[in-house]
Image: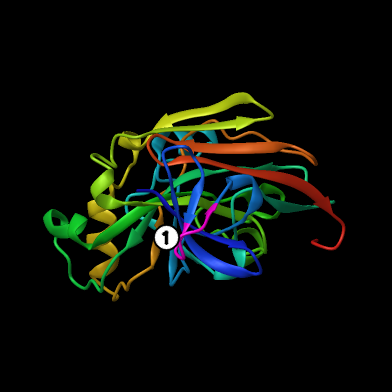
């Protein structure tokens, strides 16, 4: 059953999706989805983000796929929930969505073999890791100014338990802007797959519960503008919606 974290009735709640698409709160109350504020589905620990992890996306921006994982870290300040607003600085022309499968670590992991990696995953969700290309100095070294900005990583709406995702390496990824399909890929096209990433990261550092790995985005990124409604969708995980707004104070 898909799980969420929401705010309603003046408090924060864990909630579960019912067959009629209403939400059941942990205290038993039933509420429509339209009456809650959506929060990120987990309280993130360390967040690892992959750059250029789809060969087609790397070629789209005239780069070769890396020979080893290109990983950078993101702070929890970047995350917002479903139906929230992402603030685009007024001086930015090239703001791109990046629909990504988010892998959530379920227990402490160190020196994990590839064949054991899935045992350390609690679940999955969707992330939209916006990039402000105007500020990007080097695709191989995304800087803090680009990738750690407030509101620019919507995540959710659901936490989907790992047992409910039969093959995370074969999920269709799509992004719609104002209802028009702009991005259409599949997780099978990752350069470095999920077991490899868990093995790689745990080879030199300890992974902990609720650490998150953002696994990169396929080709099909386009510029977004003030007022655009962006829906990032991954097969079996739902659809994450947010709105882009111009913000003169977020430069």
In magenta stretch: residue 154: no
- Residue nearer the viewer, 174 or 164: 164
**In the image: residue 229, left or right of residue 147:** right
**Crowd tier of the residue under label 1, counting other residues whose Cα lies within 10 Å: few below 14, some 14–19, many 20 or above:** many
Q: Is residue 187 above or below residue 5?
A: above
The quarter of the picture where residue 144 lies is: bottom right
The picture places residue 69, in percent across and down from the top left corner, at 35, 55
Q: Name the residue under label 1.
A: 71
**Residue reaching furthest to the front:** 29
**Residue reaching furthest to the right:** 248
Residue at x 18% of width, y 59% of height: 119
The picture places residue 108, in percent across and down from the top left corner, at 25, 74
Q: Magenta stretch mostly in which secondary structure?
A: loop
**In the image: residue 6, left or right of residue 179:** left
- Residue nearer the viewer, 92 or 149: 149
The picture places residue 180, in percent across and down from the top left corner, at 63, 23
Magenta extent: 25-30
The picture places residue 82, in percent across and down from the top left corner, at 59, 50
Task: Tell me how many marks there are.
Answer: 1
Residue at x 73% of width, y 45% of height: 244
Q: In this view, does 228 lie above or below 213?
A: above
The secondary structure type at the circle numbered 1 is: strand
- Coloration of the structure image: rainbow
Quadrant in which the C terminus appears:
bottom right
Residue at x 27% of width, y 59% of height: 121
The quarter of the picture where residue 138 lies is: bottom right
């Amino acid at each position: 059953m898909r799980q969420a974290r929401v705010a309603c009735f003046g408090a924060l709640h864990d909630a579960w999706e019912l067959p009629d698409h209403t939400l059941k709160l942990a205290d038993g109350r039933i509420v429509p989805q339209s009456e809650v504020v959506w929060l990120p589905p987990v309280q993130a620990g360390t967040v690892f983000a992959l750059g250029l992890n789809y060969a087609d996306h790397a070629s789209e921006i005239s780069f070769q796929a890396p020979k080893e994982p290109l990983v950078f870290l993101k702070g929890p300040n970047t995350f917002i929930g479903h139906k929230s607003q992402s603030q685009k600085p007024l001086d930015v022309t090239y703001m791109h969505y990046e629909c990504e499968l988010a892998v959530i670590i379920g227990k402490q992991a160190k020196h994990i073999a590839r064949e054991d990696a899935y045992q350390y995953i609690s679940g999955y969700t969707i992330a939209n890791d916006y990039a402000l290309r105007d500020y990007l100095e080097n695709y191989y070294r995304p800087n803090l100014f680009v990738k750690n900005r407030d509101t620019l990583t919507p995540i959710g709406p659901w936490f989907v338990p790992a047992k409910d995702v039969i093959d995370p390496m074969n999920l269709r990824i799509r992004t719609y802007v104002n209802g028009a399909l702009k991005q259409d890929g599949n997780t099978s096209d990752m350069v470095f797959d999920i077991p490899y990433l868990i093995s790689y990261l745990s080879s030199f550092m300890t992974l902990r519960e609720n650490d998150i790995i953002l696994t990169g985005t396929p080709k099909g990124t386009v510029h977004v503008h003030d007022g655009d409604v962006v829906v990032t969708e991954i097969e079996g995980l739902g659809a994450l919606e947010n709105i882009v707004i111009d913000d003169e104070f977020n430069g």
